[in-house]
Image (tube, rainbow, N blue to C red):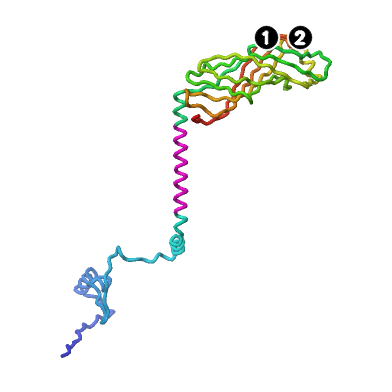
């Protein structure tokens, strides 16, 4: 038997022009406070006949990316795994290189703090000159010089110096004109050691201008001829018996003054400058 539905009686709405009564205002306020914003707040929705409602937890809901990020999502999702592996490999290689550089810097700093390496000092002890005469009428001169050099490693208490032969060179010049050149001998110098050695220098085709000849004659008469001695020597620093550096070039420039240009001359040193190129430490 079918159920009968009876319509609910509706109260007559108030006239728009009439003011609401106090009872109506309280009822309207109560309805505003208690009435939900949406009918669904009363409870779960009822499914229409022939349909079912399946409830899924929120953490398992798969959401579609917003339209403004859909292109980025497709790009990242479609990137092949090979590129990602290559990127991880590059990052790992860069990290290994940085760690190696940091370890090398720490090692160099530790060696420097322990050994305190210093550049050796040089000076000219004596100078013997032949074949150089300012009053000579020859257009080209071929001077020869015997040079005595003093190498001082006294500033290093724990570091030795290995002077490599073959490519080392010593030269003497006057007023920018090279007079003679020769080889630097090979030897090893212990810490806190002073070594004196002699080398022979020779030159050919030396030409002086008229102004240089006049200046050289005046300085020779005053017994004060300025000369420049330059040396470029490949060296290695020795730290104990195992550790040593790469071969680096040491350049020394000494300003000397001699009292004569013939025979054994007394050399007065006016100062030497030593420059060492930066080098790397190495086990050798």
Residue receiving disc 2: 221
Q: Please name which of the two marks, 2 or 1, marks the residue nearer to the observer.
A: 1
Relative to 36, 202 lies left or right:
right
As drawn, 80 above or below 43: above
Looking at the image, can residue 119 be seen?
A: yes
SS for dot 1 = strand
Viewer-closest of 34 and 230: 230
Q: Which mark is residue 266?
A: 1
Q: Are marks 2 and 1 in contact (CB under 8 Å)?
A: no
Depth check, front residue: 44 or 244: 244
Q: Closer to the N terminus: mark 2 or mark 1?
A: 2
- Region rendered in magenta: 85-106
Left or right position of 150 against 211: left
Q: Is residue 174 in view from this perspective? A: no
Return the x and y of residue 237 as percentages of the image width and height: 53, 24
Q: Is residue 51 left or right of residue 122?
A: left
Instruction: Please state, as top left, top right, bottom left or bottom right, where the N terminus lies in the image.
Output: bottom left
Q: Whole-Å distance between the Cαs marked 2 and 1? A: 15 Å
Secondary structure of residue under mark 2 = helix
What secondary structure prevails in the magenta region?
Answer: helix
Query: Quarter-wise, where is residue 2 in the image?
Result: bottom left
């Amino acid at each position: 038997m079918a159920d009968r539905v009876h319509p609910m009686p509706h109260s007559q709405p108030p006239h728009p022009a009439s003011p609401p009564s106090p009872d109506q205002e309280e009822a309207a306020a109560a309805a505003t406070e208690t009435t939900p914003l949406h009918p669904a707040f009363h409870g779960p929705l009822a499914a229409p006949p022939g349909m079912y409602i399946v409830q899924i937890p929120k953490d398992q809901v798969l959401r579609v990316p917003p339209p403004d990020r859909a292109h980025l999502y497709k790009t990242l999702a479609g990137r092949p795994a090979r590129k990602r592996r290559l990127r991880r490999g590059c990052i790992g290689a860069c990290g290994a290189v940085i760690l190696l550089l940091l370890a090398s810097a720490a090692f160099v700093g530790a060696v420097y703090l322990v050994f305190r390496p210093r550049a050796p000092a040089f000076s000219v002890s004596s100078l013997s000159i032949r074949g150089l005469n300012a009053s000579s009428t020859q257009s080209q001169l071929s001077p020869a010089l015997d040079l005595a050099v003093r190498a001082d490693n006294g500033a290093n208490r724990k570091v030795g110096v290995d002077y490599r032969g073959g490519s080392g060179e010593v030269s003497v010049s006057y007023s920018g004109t090279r007079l003679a050149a020769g080889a630097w001998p090979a030897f090893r110098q212990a810490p806190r050691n002073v070594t004196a050695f002699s080398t022979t220098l020779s030159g050919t085709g030396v030409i002086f201008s008229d102004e240089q000849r006049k200046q050289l004659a005046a300085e020779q008469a005053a017994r004060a001829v300025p000369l420049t001695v330059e040396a470029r020597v490949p060296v290695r620093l020795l730290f104990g018996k195992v550790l040593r550096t790469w071969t680096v070039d040491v350049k020394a420039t000494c300003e000397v003054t001699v009292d004569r240009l013939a025979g054994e001359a007394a050399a007065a040193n006016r100062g030497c400058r030593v420059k060492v190129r930066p080098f790397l430490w190495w086990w050798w």
